[in-house]
Image (cartoon, rainbow, N blue to C red):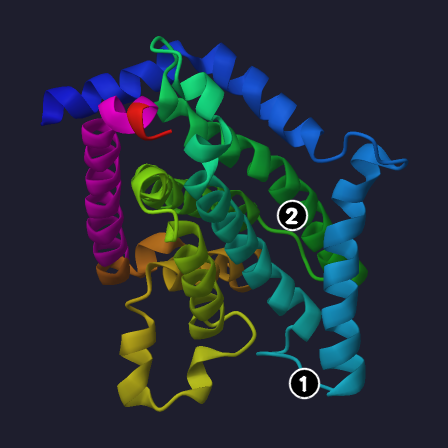
Amino acid sequence: MIKDLLLFFKILVTQKKLIISLAKRDFASNYVGSMLGFIWAFINPLVTIFVFWVIFRVGFKVKPVNNVPFVVWLTAGMAAWFVFADIVSRSTSAVIENSMLIKKTLFPASILPVVKAISSLIIHGIFLSILIGLLVLEKMPPSIYFCQFLYYLLCMIVLALGLGWGLAALQVFLRDTGQIVGVLLQLGFWFTPIFWNLKIMPVEFQKYFMLNPMYYVVQGYRDSFINFIPFWQHPYLTIYFWSITLAVLLSGTILFKKLRPQFADVL
């Protein structure tokens, strides 16, 4: 099993040029034919954040969270969740969308979820630049802890790819998988403390919400950009997260490898 897993990831390393090329094409395809082109990549996150700012800060007059402006606190959490949801949802349909490539026996199908992940990370970079802009506008101090987000980004990517490989394989044989994933991601969004603070929940229930692996990532982004708390101050939560994530990664890669030989027949 370990040998097969190492071979699986070796393919990703050897095909890095192809992955980058396909990721660029995938990202560019979203804006082909539009007048503003790549500018839409900035407009969409800006409009999303502006709408939430108007609704919650101007409309509902939501108070700062721990003396942090709500729009900053919210954007930090949204940045982590949006890229996760985008990678998972787009990876689920990656094999179906590239059926012509899959039918070519020499094409390494395992790179497709990685292509979707890299394409999603471009938008994530724009989202993060907006977050930094908000921190500057709100006159919040910079910190070396900003760099810590790279660790949590790695956490999120490993979790998302593990799910992406498994779901992409299932989608080939069970076409309802994409719809189910969409519903589960919506539920996950509201069950993850993104719009709401975990502290509003009774203490006895907080531990159950912390079992959600994405709580670790969302809170980690806030610890990196806002609270300046190092990840090693949460040793038990870190061990729990990586135990779940590595199990998901192992299951997803094995499932993809086992079902890959039948893709061409079903597609």
Left or right: residue 246 versus residue 175 is left
Name the image quarter holding residue 233.
Answer: bottom left
Check disc 1 and report its element: helix, strand or loop: loop
Q: Nearer the viewer, residue 132 or 37?
A: 37
- Which region is colored magenta? 238-264
Q: Quadrant of the N terminus?
A: top left
Q: Position of residue 114 (x, y in %)?
A: 44, 30
User: In the image, what residue type sits under mark 2?
Assistant: Leu
**Residue topped by disc 2:** 128
**Residue topped by disc 1:** 63
Q: Position of residue 147 (x, y in %)?
A: 53, 42
Question: Is-magenta flag for residue 242?
Answer: yes
Residue 128 appears in the picture as rendered:
yes
Question: Is-magenta flag for residue 20?
Answer: no
- Total numbered labels placed on residues in the image: 2
Name the image quarter holding residue 22.
Answer: top right
User: In the image, what residue type sits under mark 1?
Assistant: Lys
Q: Classify mark 1: residues with Cα within 10 Å, few (<14), some (14-19) or many (20+).
A: few
Give the answer, above or below, for where 194 lies relative to 132: below
Q: Position of residue 12 (x, y in %)?
A: 36, 19
- The residue lying at 30 percent from left, 85 percent from top is 205
Residue 136 appears in the picture as rendered:
no
Q: Classify mark 2: residues with Cα within 10 Å, few (<14), some (14-19) or many (20+).
A: some
